Image (cartoon, rainbow, N blue to C red):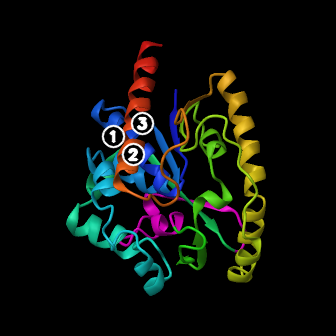
Amino acid sequence: MKLGLVCEGGGMRGVFTAGVLEVFMEENFYPDEVIGVSAGASNTVSYVAKQKGRCYRTNVDYFGDKRYVSMENLIKTGSMFGMDFLFGELPNKLDPFDRETFFANSCEYYAGATDVMTGKVKFFGKEDMDEAFTPLRASCSLPLVGNVIPYCGRKYMDGGIGDSIPIKKALDDGCDQVILILTRERGYVKKAQKGAFIYKLLYKKYPGLLHAMKNRHIEYNKTLKYIKKLERKGKVIVIAPPQPLPVGRVAKNKDDLLKAYAVGRKMGKKFLENYKSC
């Protein structure tokens, strides 16, 4: 049986996912395929590299560091998140990323980024991961607070725009069962995007991106309904916060991050207890 793991994004709500993944690593629990978009993609690289504690460190320890996230970054670079810090100095010097284990792990890995011209998601595998982690930069580059990222002749942004919950990718790849980590609570319904005028002004060159953003809530809610059907068939097992997390795309303080991380750990342990007893 091929087992898949799909991780939703959500900006700094991804610290919940980090909590789940840390528990998985502690219990040496790994699927056959991992797919992530946005924060779901950046968290899962440490997981596939089997670096215990790194999901926590990269999400929590550097909170408050202006190099990580700040208005200063936004003014200077156009991105609130310090991409050169997150995907340069951090993995290369401060908290080295284990590339050798990442590539040696038999687990398939895919990070999704949205092509701004087509509005469709492109999934990048291990073979696409360059020294600068460009596919991850693209996958994590959020609208309004991030830049359009060029890569291999195309331009990309946040993978969650084109496919917020890439469950179909996992099924198309032949996964018989999928573990799905959501960063929104069960029962959440996505509403239409606000600030349409601003998006049209900023991204008028990218019709595909605008179309995907306009319809994102529709596609998101359709996917949630599809997931419920898959759950009834035993094809999908969902791990999600029991209630709204205290953090949003950007966290206000470290305590909220720690609370969300703790919830992730709790839900990860609960899942493994139930999964192993089946």
The answer to whether residue 140 is visible is yes
In the figure, 110 relative to 260: above or below?
below
Viewer-proximal residue among 235 and 195: 195
Q: Give yes or no for residue 135 being in the magenta stretch.
A: yes
Q: Earlier in the sequence, mark 3 or mark 1?
A: 1
Image quadrant where residue 32 sits? top left
Q: Give yes or no for residue 11 being in the magenta stretch.
A: no
Q: Residues within 10 Å of mark 2 (few under 14, many from 20)?
A: many
Secondary-structure class at tag 2 = helix
In this rendering, position of residue 170 left or right of residue 218: left
In the figure, 214 relative to 255: above or below?
below
The numbered dot on residue 22 is 1
Viewer-proximal residue among 262 and 108: 262
Pointer 2 residue = 18
Image quadrant where residue 225 sits? top right
Residue located at (39% from left, 30% from top): 266
Q: Alpha-carbon distance for marks 3 and 2?
A: 10 Å
In this rendering, position of residue 174 left or right of residue 87: right
**Three-letter amino acid code of the residue under disc 1:** Glu
Secondary-structure class at tag 3 = helix
Residue 181 point in image, percent of width and height: 52, 39
Q: Which circle, 3 or 1, is nearer the viewer?
A: 3
The answer to whether residue 106 is visible is no
Residue farthest toward the top in the current orientation of the protein:
277
Q: Alpha-carbon distance for marks 2 and 1?
A: 6 Å
Q: Does the residue at mark 2 contact the one at mark 1 (Cβ under 8 Å)?
A: yes
Q: Which circle, 3 or 2, is nearer the viewer?
A: 3
Q: Does the residue at mark 3 contact the one at mark 1 (Cβ under 8 Å)?
A: no
The numbered dot on residue 263 is 3
The boundaries of the magenta stretch are 117-140
In this rendering, position of residue 142 left or right of residue 31: right
